[in-house]
Amino acid sequence: MNLLAFDTSTDVLSIAAARTVDGAVQVWAHTGAGGAQASTGLIAGVLGVLQQAGLTLAELDAICFGSGPGSFTGLRIATGVAQGLAFGANVPVIPIPTLLALAEATRQERVLAVLDARMGEVYAAAYERVGVEWDTIFAPCLCKPDALPLLPDGLWNGVGSGFAAYGDVLQKRFATQLSAIGAARYPHAREIAQLALDRIYEACPAEQAL
């Protein structure tokens, strides 16, 4: 399975190419400046990562992208580039939720993923791993950090830039339920590619990228 993945939903641009060789998955990754600079750095970064992986666009099985929530401009860039590359290479696309990619990065079983949405709000979702799949405990939402849906009883791992921005509020909201705060602040294309390997059944035509 050969995959290209990228995320431009936050202040960090990330790109990854995943290639399966003799049953083992090899990943090449790049991280750069996101935000307003993502539009100028994405194509060059994609070409660089594909060259490192020894892949061409035509050899890909799918193109994966972070589908949000996140920066509106960043999501438009990711969707537009995914569609353009996929049309040109005649391959499908796989949208992967950015908060799920954050959860995947923790390697934990129960995760509260929170991104700073600015203007006093956060994007958040909660997931629980069941085998190799994730169950959604509450779906991605936009709200004030002190108004997030409550979590089921038990210990949860927090992850994302929302904890850097509103850590005190979130700790108060969830009292003793947060057992640890993960180091990852933003979603990364590595995890988007990893999730896509198990979600190839969700691949869709380029025109359906949203």
Image (cartoon, rainbow, N blue to C red):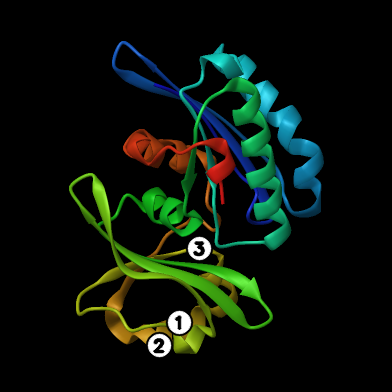
Q: Residues within 10 Å of mark 2 (few under 14, many from 20)?
A: some
Q: Pointer 3: what residue?
A: 160
Q: Quadrant of residue 127?
A: bottom left
Amino acid under label 2? Answer: Arg
The CA span between labels 3 and 2 is 16 Å
Q: In the picture provided, is 18 more to the left or to the right than 157?
A: right
Q: In the picture provided, is 137 more to the left or to the right than 147?
A: left
**From the viewer's perspective, is residue 167 above or below residue 81?**
below
The CA span between labels 2 and 1 is 5 Å
Determine whether label 2 and label 1 are within 8 Å by CB.
Answer: yes
Q: Pointer 1: what residue?
A: 170
Q: Secondary structure at mark 1?
A: helix
Residue nearer the viewer, 201 or 21: 201
**From the viewer's perspective, is residue 169 above or below residue 24?**
below
Q: Residue 59: horizontal and vertical position, in percent? A: 52, 14
Q: Secondary structure at mark 3?
A: loop
Residue nearer the viewer, 166 or 190: 190
Which residue is painted at 62% across and 29% down in the image? 87
Amino acid under label 3? Answer: Gly
Amino acid under label 1? Answer: Leu
The CA span between labels 1 and 3 is 12 Å
- The quadrant of the image that shows the N terminus is top left
Q: Quadrant of residue 2?
A: top left
Q: Pointer 2: what residue?
A: 173
Q: Residue 132: horizontal and vertical position, in percent? A: 23, 44
Q: Which mark is residue 94?
A: none
